[in-house]
Image (spheres, helix red, strand yellow):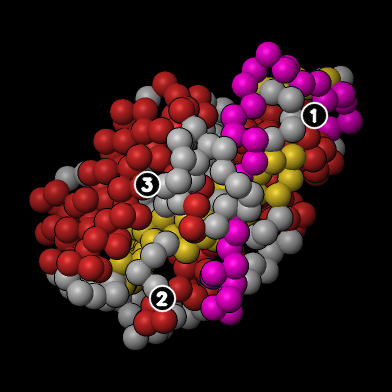
Amino acid sequence: MFNADSKIYIAGHTGLLGSALLSVLESKGYKNLLTRTHAELDLTDKVQTEAFFKAKKLEYVFLCAGKVGGIISNKTRPADFLHQNLVIQDNVFEAANAYEVNNLIFYGSSCTYPKLCEQPMSEKQWLTGALEETSMGYAAAKIAGIIACRAYNTQYNKNCFIGVIPNSIYGENDNFDLENSHVFSALIRRFHEAQKAGNSEITLWGTGQPRREFIFSKDVADASIFLMLNAEKLENKPYNLGTGVDYSIKELAKKIANVTHFKGEIKWDTSKPDGTPQKLLDSSKLLALGWKPSVKFEDGLKATYHWFKQHYD
Ligand SMILES: NC(=O)c1ccc[n+]([C@@H]2O[C@H](COP(=O)([O-])OP(=O)(O)OC[C@H]3O[C@@H](n4cnc5c(N)ncnc54)[C@H](OP(=O)(O)O)[C@@H]3O)[C@@H](O)[C@H]2O)c1
């Protein structure tokens, strides 16, 4: 049973989600938390990964390690996203299975849903249509991970691997590098820099019409702990994880302009692509189990911007 004394490994604890998990688990009194930096344990190395699982006798694993990036890096290096995520997942799943971890959470992505999917996207619509081209390498690895959860549980007759599909995560420790960041963190940086430079306008990509759902990293961490605690009740199928609320990129830009105190004009370069028109998850299956998000978007945005300003230099 998942409890305060359980031996818990947070893979990728320096990243956006891993750092939120570490902080939420610590705040809830979980005492036996194991972490390794990428330099200390490269999860693409099968021998190192297996030796770590064998030596540590881990009971619970949150697999937050992976190669994650924004539209530009996904588009230009799809093979890296496919390969690195597949290898990490395969090594960790094999070791977790061999050394009998009680439960492992694997994080998929909303880009595993069809590009033109009925909204909100329920788990029933998974794998029913063509994917968005630009993130296909990453999405293929994430699809393999979700299928692996089901496959290991089925073949080894256990209820160990839990597949979760969160929508866009934002929060402290996000990547604010413009090449590799997601829309939320990229806009925070762009607006902050425009405000500091005293610019009278800012030009953003696309029409601003696409709609996106954002969930605060600590809400994803909280939901992940809830799933571990309720692992016995879960289906051998993935669970969507979102807030149920989406914003157009235009609305998001206005909210970020407000929090960063940018007073100039927001212009849209409509020659640039928009991507998938809407990505809103139907998370009712998870909500029906009794979990709900608790962080208001405005509060999460303020906390993220506060963290960004402290770490910007
Ligand atoms: N961010 C989102 O919006 C989002 C949405 C849905 C699902 N997810 C999924 O949630 C998980 C966490 O995402 P995130 O946004 O927190 O990612 P992130 O901030 O980029 O963090 C990734 C973590 O993985 C580590 N890592 C990368 N390669 C590694 C390797 N070979 N061996 C060991 N550690 C390695 C990184 O360490 P270094 O930085 O030192 O390399 C970092 O600690 C990923 O599986 C992602 O696909 C994310």
Name the residue tied to disc 2.
234
Could you classify mark 2 by the number of other residues whose Cα lies within 10 Å: few (under 14), some (14-19), or many (20 or more)?
A: some
Residue at image x 68%, y 22%? 205
Q: How far apart are marks 3 and 2 (CA)?
A: 20 Å
Front tag of 3 and 1: 3
Q: In this view, does 220 lie above or below 57?
A: above
Residue 143 appears left or right of 297: left
The first of marks 3 and 2 along the sequence is 3
Locate the C terminus by quadrant. Answer: top right
**Dot 1 lies on which element?**
helix
Whether residue 180 is visible: no
Q: In this view, does 256 lie above or below 16?
A: above
Residue at image x 10%, y 50%? 47
Name the residue tied to disc 1.
195
Q: Main secondary structure of the magenta part?
A: loop
The first of marks 3 and 1 along the sequence is 3
Q: Distance between the residues labelled 3 and 1?
A: 37 Å
The three-letter code of the residue at mark 3 reads: Lys
Whether residue 271 is visible: yes
**Dot 3 lies on which element?**
helix
Residue 289, horizontal then vertical, whole percent:
54, 78
- Label 3 C-beta lies within 8 Å of the nearest ligand 1 atom: yes
Q: Is residue 254 above or below residue 226?
A: above
Residue 226, horizontal then vertical, whole percent:
49, 75
Locate the N terminus by quadrant. Answer: bottom left
- Region in magenta: 262-291
Examine the image and state in which quarter residue 199 appears: top right
